[in-house]
Image: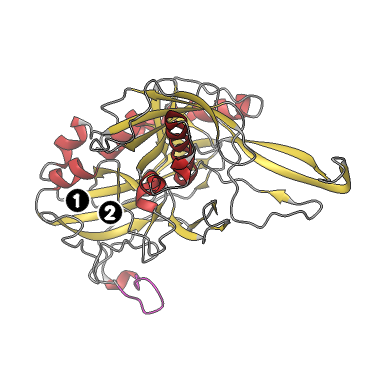
Amino acid sequence: MMRMLQIRPLDPIVVRDGRPFGETPGARAHSMDEITPSVVAGTIRTLLGKYLSDASHNDIVFQSKTMEWITKLVVRGPLYEWGGKLYFPVPKDMEIYEVNGRLQAGIKRPVRISHEQGFLGTGKTGQYEDILWPVSIRHEGKPSPHAPAYISADWMIKWLGDSLPLNDWSQTLDNWHKYYRELHSQTNVHPVDLPFMPSFVRDIRTHTAIDSSTHKAKDQALFTTEALVLPEGMSLLTGVEWPEDNNEWRWPEHLSAVHSFGGKRRLAHFSEVKHEDLWRCPDDILSRVDGARFIRMVLITPAYFSKGWQPGWLDNELQTTEEFHPEVRLQLRWACVPRWQPISGWSYARRKAKAVRRMAPAGSVYFFEVKSGNPLQLVEQLWLQSVSDPNRRKGALDREDGFGLAVWGIWSPQ
């Protein structure tokens, strides 16, 4: 049974990246740009373990085999909710650039080209030259540093359905650019009527190291931390697949608690909410992918793929395997994937740092051509489901942690 949890941060959230951070004077703890799924999953499992410990009036939950199934609970998320709307990362097949002081949007779509046009494939050996269709860039502007980082769910649905022409972006982007210039540098409050959100503001603090023996400040031992400040009223939504056949441990009734979240024991409020339709594919998308020839996959959270940017469920010809879906076969035509994203963490069970994993960032887009079957079945089953590959490291359960959540749409070759 899927249980929904809402997380409301009470403090700036510390989500460190993998760069070394120690007791060196002047050290700086750099922050990630977003809240990673593993941070959310680990916190929720710890919270549930504490609840079960209190219910049984002992701490055996963390010292017995009971904790094994808690650590393997499937957690999906996080999804950002603000002002009653969901927000997704801006897909990488949309590029926002600036021309003469105005923002414009460009669509990236694969184009069938001939060998005379210069495409030499990927990698050092030039493989997939006869399979992949590179995208065509048809503008002269450069990507704008003022581009939004998140897009509302209703606009995302229109974008995935190919029902959002570029003309509709003009006035909205102008309003966004005006807001960014006049307001964003002064406040962290975002206008609700705009379907965009910028990157999260960073809270930078300077601290003094404390001598544990004297409890006094150390001389010349300053260090700096970064934290993410979410907009006022924003919350994170996440789902927990709780096994219904578990008779020994019951789901906590009326769950509502304040618990540490992220690094430095910053606090957040956790509560159960009802949101049954969150994980269901919208009817508009289902009607458009029904019988479609070309579909695309957009990552909502970073995904782990065993072949780097290339999913492991693609064979040597870049076609999906039967393990991915037995009735629908897809052919990869192109992928808009930025530089890989390093994600690690700290294992409290093993008391050491987790191995760094190279993830395909959220917003990455994969373009497919349907070779056989109806993609309606695939999209209906895999909407906001994990498409990550199983990790070869036993200590990192990427599928169970919410990595690789994907949404689906259609596209047309240019």
In the image, which residues are magenta? 118-127
Residue drawn 61% across and 24% down? 183
Task: Check residue 367 in the rendering and tell me which mark sits there, or answer none.
Answer: 2
**Residue 272, quarter of the rendered image:** top left
Number of other residues with Cα within 10 Å of mark 2, as a class: few under 14, some 14 to 19, many 20 or more: many
Q: Which residue is situated farthest in the right direction here?
A: 219
Most frequent secondary structure within the magenta stretch: loop
* Total numbered badges shown on the rendered structure: 2
Q: Amino acid at mark 1?
A: Phe
Q: Which residue is at the front of the view, 76 or 265? A: 265
User: Taking the image as drawn, is residue 164 in sight?
Assistant: no
Residue 60 visible in the current orientation: yes
Image position, residue 233 (x, y; %): 51, 21
Q: Are marks 1 and 2 in contact (CB under 8 Å)?
A: yes
Query: Residue 294's mark?
Result: 1
* Residue appearing at x 54%, y 37% in the figure: 199
Place residue 124 in its image quadrant: bottom left
Image: 73 above or below 82 = below
Horizontally, residue 304 falls left or right of residue 50, namely left
The residue sitting at 24% across, 35% down in the picture is: 244
Q: Going by the image, does 229 lie left or right of 373?
A: right
* Residue 328 as seen in the image, left or right of residue 56: left
For numbered disc 2, what is the local secondary structure? Answer: strand
Where residue 377 appears, as percent x and y from the top left, is 13, 45
Q: Is residue 108 above or below residue 147?
A: below
Observer-nearest of 61 and 346: 61
Please state which amino acid type lies under the numbered disc 2.
Phe
Tell which of 51 and 381 is nearer to you.
51
Image height check: is 110 above or below 149? below
Check residue 119 for magenta coloring: yes
Residue 288 placed where, x, y %?
A: 17, 38
Judged from this view, the residue extending furthest toward the bottom is 125
